[in-house]
Image (cartoon, rainbow, N blue to C red):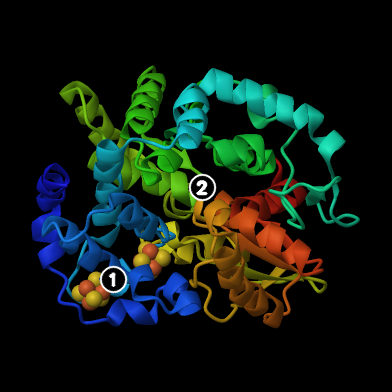
């Protein structure tokens, strides 16, 4: 434990910033459900202080408490002391995993599969091809699935099925020159968009082409590494970052665009913060992070997209959910709304608490499903109360949670990405 304390002590300066004011209690979605001090930032930071002081003998328990967190950043956004809560939590998870080792299950999933993009892709393709044997549509026209037979893992869950084929099978590579815009953008697809929501990738490409932006999309992209680093697996994370950096180094471009808030957050903030290794790669990471932009932010800042003044008579009511990684971590909130409002076939209605976390939190949903769905219920109630027929969100992970929970609640509300809404407008009115 002394060895562990020495490593956690490296976070001491940041830990000391927390003055235990308790402001984070008001915003933590996990604490709101459990009421446990160990579930809120203040409690977790105190646990890490305890590790530094060698007060605990069981690092597994501390790791478990640290994992009961969505990494939503709500605490960090409100903290009057500017405590870098996410940085502390992610670094502490990696220190604990370095000390204790990764569980065998996570080793198989992360180091055995996710770290190898080719193998990961093959496995997912096989699952997509065979999923109908095990899954059936959850409800007619819902677009979601549920287990066909009893499954101890899935039980009564609804979920979005895998796309068959994934986006990269239809569009494996792109390298087009900048046209009138004079801009060349690289597109980082992201696993969820490639394998579950290929329409978002199609809409992104269509919007970029419409605005005459040159596109570079390298073949066989890997995961952004967020699931690995959130699990404390530094090895897989480093491997994936290195792999992607090499792929995107093939070409020069002005921007790296993603349509997933979590990928944007990972590349912009987590890659520079957490990559350990070669200094040449670090320089490339820092330069890529500066060029990385959310697709909504890029289209609104680099083109003339504006909210539409006129509205169709039969406009569909739409609302928007702010992904935590987009609003709280990157400060992007207006641009997705502008993208939605640029389409006159939709009428925008703000829901209550649009930036309240949806409760997914990556693997948090798998590990703490009950808490995750309790958090999600408040979001679903807010969406329903807005009387919208469509809810948009700029994060594919949030879209998974919203789709599953809306389907399970029996609602017919459709989940879309703002770039899909915008691309519908292009297709209908302005195809050049
Ligand atoms: S709001 Fe910040 S300073 Fe206050 S208890 Fe939470 S983490 Fe500590
Ligand atoms: S990151 Fe989110 S879930 Fe985790 S402690 Fe902070 S507010 Fe709570």
Q: Is residue 133 left or right of residue 194?
A: right
The residue positioned 20% from the left and 29% from the top of the image is 283
Q: Which mark is residue 344?
A: none
Q: Residue furthest right?
A: 140
Q: Is mark 1 within 8 Å of ligand 2?
A: no
Question: Badge 1: few (under 14), some or many (20 or more) residues near its Cα, within 10 Å?
Answer: some
The residue positioned 66% from the left and 50% from the top of the image is 420
Q: Residue furthest front?
A: 57
Above or below, 244 against 20 in this view is above
The secondary structure type at the circle numbered 1 is helix
Q: Which quadrant would the C terminus be assigned to in this image?
A: top right
Q: Which residue is mark 2?
A: 260
Looking at the rendering, which quadrant does residue 36 occupy? Answer: bottom left
Of badges 2 and 1, nearer the viewer stands 1
Q: Are marks 2 and 1 in contact (CB under 8 Å)?
A: no
Along the line of sight, which residue is nearer the eye, 362 or 181? 362
Q: Quadrant of ligand 1?
A: bottom left
Q: Position of residue 68 (x, y in %)?
A: 42, 60
Along the line of sight, which residue is nearer the eye, 66 or 202? 66
Q: Position of residue 74 (x, y in %)?
A: 37, 69
Q: Is residue 390 left or right of residue 255?
A: right
The secondary structure type at the circle numbered 2 is loop
Along the line of sight, which residue is nearer the eye, 124 or 45? 45
- Does label 2 or label 1 sit earlier along the sequence? 1
Q: Position of residue 171 (x, y in %)?
A: 65, 24
Q: Is residue 213 left or right of residue 71?
A: right
Q: Does residue 147 appear in the picture of this structure?
A: yes
Q: Does residue 176 appear in the picture of this structure?
A: no
Q: Which residue is mark 1?
A: 43
Q: Distance of mark 2 from mark 1, alpha carbons?
A: 30 Å
């Amino acid at each position: 434990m002394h060895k562990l304390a020495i490593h956690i002590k490296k976070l001491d300066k940041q830990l000391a910033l927390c003055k235990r004011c308790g402001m984070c209690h008001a915003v933590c979605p996990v604490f709101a459900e459990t009421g446990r001090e160990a579930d809120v930032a203040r409690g977790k930071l105190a646990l890490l202080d305890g590790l530094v002081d060698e007060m605990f003998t069981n690092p597994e328990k501390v790791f478990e408490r640290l994992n009961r967190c969505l990494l939503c950043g709500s605490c960090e956004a409100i903290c009057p002391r500017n405590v870098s809560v996410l940085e502390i939590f992610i670094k502490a998870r990696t220190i604990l995993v370095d000390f204790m080792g990764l569980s065998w299950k996570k080793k198989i999933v992360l180091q055995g599969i996710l770290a190898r993009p080719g193998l990961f892709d093959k496995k997912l393709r096989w699952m997509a091809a065979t999923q109908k044997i095990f899954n059936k549509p959850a409800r007619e026209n819902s677009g979601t699935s549920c287990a066909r037979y009893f499954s101890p893992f899935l039980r009564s869950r609804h979920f979005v099925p895998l796309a068959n084929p994934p986006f990269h099978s239809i569009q494996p590579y792109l390298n087009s020159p900048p046209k009138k815009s004079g801009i060349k953008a690289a597109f980082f697809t992201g696993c969820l968009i490639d394998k579950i929501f290929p329409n978002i990738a199609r809409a992104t490409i269509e919007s970029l082409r419409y605005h005459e932006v040159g596109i570079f999309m390298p073949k066989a992209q890997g995961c952004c590494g967020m699931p690995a680093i959130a699990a404390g697996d530094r090895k897989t994370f480093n491997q994936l970052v290195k792999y992607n950096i090499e792929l995107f180094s093939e070409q020069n471009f002005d921007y790296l665009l993603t349509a997933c808030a979590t990928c944007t957050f990972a590349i912009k903030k987590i890659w520079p913060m957490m990559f350990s290794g070669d200094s040449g790669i670090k320089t490339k990471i820092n330069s890529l992070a500066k060029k990385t932009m959310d697709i909504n932010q890029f289209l609104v800042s680099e083109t003339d997209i504006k909210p539409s003044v006129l509205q169709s008579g039969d406009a569909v009511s739409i609302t928007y959910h702010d992904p935590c990684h987009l609003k709280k971590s990157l400060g992007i909130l207006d641009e997705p709304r502008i993208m939605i409002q640029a389409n006159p076939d939709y009428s925008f209605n703000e829901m209550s608490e649009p930036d309240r976390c949806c409760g997914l939190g990556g693997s948090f949903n798998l590990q703490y499903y009950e808490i995750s769905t309790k958090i999600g219920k408040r979001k679903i109630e807010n969406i329903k109360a807005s009387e919208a027929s469509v809810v948009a969100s700029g994060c594919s992970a949030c879209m998974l949670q919203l789709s599953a929970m809306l389907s399970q609640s029996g609602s017919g509300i459709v989940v879309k990405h703002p770039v899909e809404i915008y691309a519908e407008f292009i297709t209908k009115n302005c195809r050049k």
